[in-house]
Amino acid sequence: AFPSFPTQYSLCNDPLIELSNSGASGSLFYVSSDDEFIIKTVQHKEAEFLQKLLPGYYMNLNQNPRTLLPKFYGLYCVQAGGKNIRIVVMNNLLPRSVRMHLKYDLKGSTYKRRASQKEREKVFPTFKDLDFMQDIPDGLFLDSDMYNALCKTLQRDCLVLQSFKIMDYSLLVAIHNLDQAQRERAAGAGSGDGPGRPAAQRALYSTAMESIQGEAPRGGTFDTDDQ
């Protein structure tokens, strides 16, 4: 079994919220009512792959608590209508109360790494490396300790993915703009202050395990208070 976490209250006491954005693999996604967990349906081969990764994944969590890889809390098989439905429970990447104004999927490559026109037309598009270089040419400013810790964590995570023979992964960077949030509050937008989940955040981001199907996963998150 995967590491045990107190998920029962979040998953069983209140209805799950279905997310409209299905993954590239056709999986269904749900978020728990308290916004703590993401639930994703997985195919049989994905479930087998995750089980094979478990020893190395568990060791990495113990040795590298700052890992930016997705936190898998459980893998379950539910029988319904004579069919086996496999689901994985993982951490939710974005907080309920803080609106993310920009989102980038970064691979460290510039080859065909620009968001398509179709993607740009979405309410909350996911931009790519060339967009990041254009929008934020000076990059994100971090103090030296945080920068060194982040680089070390990314290097260790990449070594772990390499040991799993996973090569199609990326880093999801979500940015909350303090100035823009202040203007929104002043204008009475209330987009990130209400008790409900902001509509623009009703999106789900692929996880590293989707790489086995040839998709572009997000290998983790980077929480930032960048202005």
Image: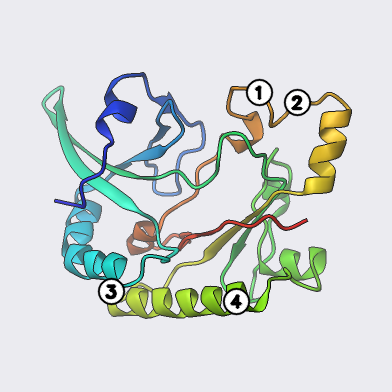
Nearer mark to the viewer, of 4 and 1: 4
Return the mark for residue 194. 1
Pick the quarter of the image with the C terminus: bottom right
Give the residue type at disc 1: Gly
Q: Is residue 47 above or below residue 83?
A: below
Q: CA distance from mark 4 to mark 1?
A: 34 Å
Q: Position of residue 38 (x, y in %)?
A: 40, 39
Give the residue type at disc 2: Gly
Q: CA distance from mark 3 to mark 1?
A: 41 Å
Residue occupying image coordinates x 21% and y 60% = 49
Q: Quadrant of residue 159?
A: bottom left
Callout 2 touching callout 1 (CB < 8 Å):
yes
Q: Is 161 positioned to the left or the right of 95 in the image? A: left
Q: Which residue was labeled with disc 3?
A: 164
Q: Is 130 positioned to the left or the right of 44 in the image? A: right
Q: CA distance from mark 2 to mark 1?
A: 6 Å
Give the residue type at disc 3: Phe
Q: Is 1 positioned to the left or the right of 91 in the image? A: left
Q: Which residue was labeled with disc 4?
A: 145
Tag 2's secondary structure?
Answer: loop
Give the residue type at disc 4: Asp
